[in-house]
Amino acid sequence: MLRVDLGQLDREGSVAVEASIPAEDGLWDGAGLLWDGDVVVKLQATFAGTGEVVARGTVEGRLRQECRRCLKAVDTPYAQALTLVFVSDGSEEDGDGGAYGFDADQAELDLGEAVREEVVLAVNPYVVCDPECKGLCSRCGADLNEGPCHCSENEFDPRWEALRRLKSE
């Protein structure tokens, strides 16, 4: 699906790779991401020198996430520019700098795992449903967006008692 034919890349110098990856695809297994529809990947792969392939492009889709304050479902757009650098195992580069290794003797270069890794690292885990979201009560768990809870303001958490004693000294 996200593969570059290295023979074609060698002949043409540049190859377009486009894919629409379903939300249920095995590529996303274990990533902790819930997609709302297909994920569209558009990359342009080119040879950047002896033993190096660079793929540049975009990844777009819609994520289903939870508000970090009230835990309600939030649909968020995802659009990210990507630059992936692949270095053949026989090249002189030592693999530092975020480059992915590949075997220059293989017929195809699989971009899937690299795309998955870059997407997982770029997802914002701290989404909120509304900037004015009040979240949940830390004592009873009531949604404070729906109104105040009935917890007493005078209730003390015993775990803070040692600090209260220090403050009063």
Image: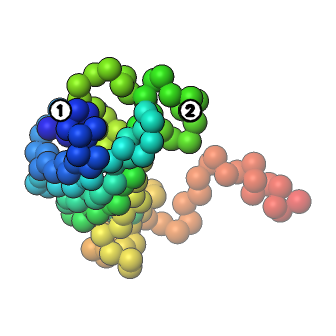
Q: Is residue 112 above or below residue 149?
A: above
Query: Which quadrant of the view contains residue 86?
Result: top left
Q: Is residue 13 above or below residue 101?
A: below
The answer to whether residue 52 is visible is: yes
The answer to whether residue 28 is visible is: no
From the image, tell me which residue sits under label 2. Answer: 93
Q: What's the residue type where badge 2 is placed? A: Glu
Dot 2, crowdedness within 10 Å: few (<14), some or many (≥20)? some
Q: Is residue 47 above or below residue 62?
A: above
From the image, tell me which residue sits under label 1. Answer: 26
Q: Residue furthest right?
A: 169
Q: Residue drawn 26% across and 49% down?
A: 14
Q: Residue drawn 70% across and 51% down?
A: 161
Query: Which quadrant of the view contains residue 2?
Result: top left
Query: Which of 20 and 102 lies nearest the eye of the viewer?
Result: 102
Q: Label 1 to label 2, Cα distance in Å?
A: 31 Å
Q: Which quadrant would the N terminus be assigned to in this image?
A: top left
Q: Total number of numbered labels? A: 2
Circle on res. 88: none
Query: Which of 8 and 53 lies nearest the eye of the viewer?
Result: 8
Q: Position of residue 42 (x, y in %)?
A: 21, 55
Q: Residue drawn 28% across and 58% down?
A: 58
Residue 37 placement, left or right of 135: left
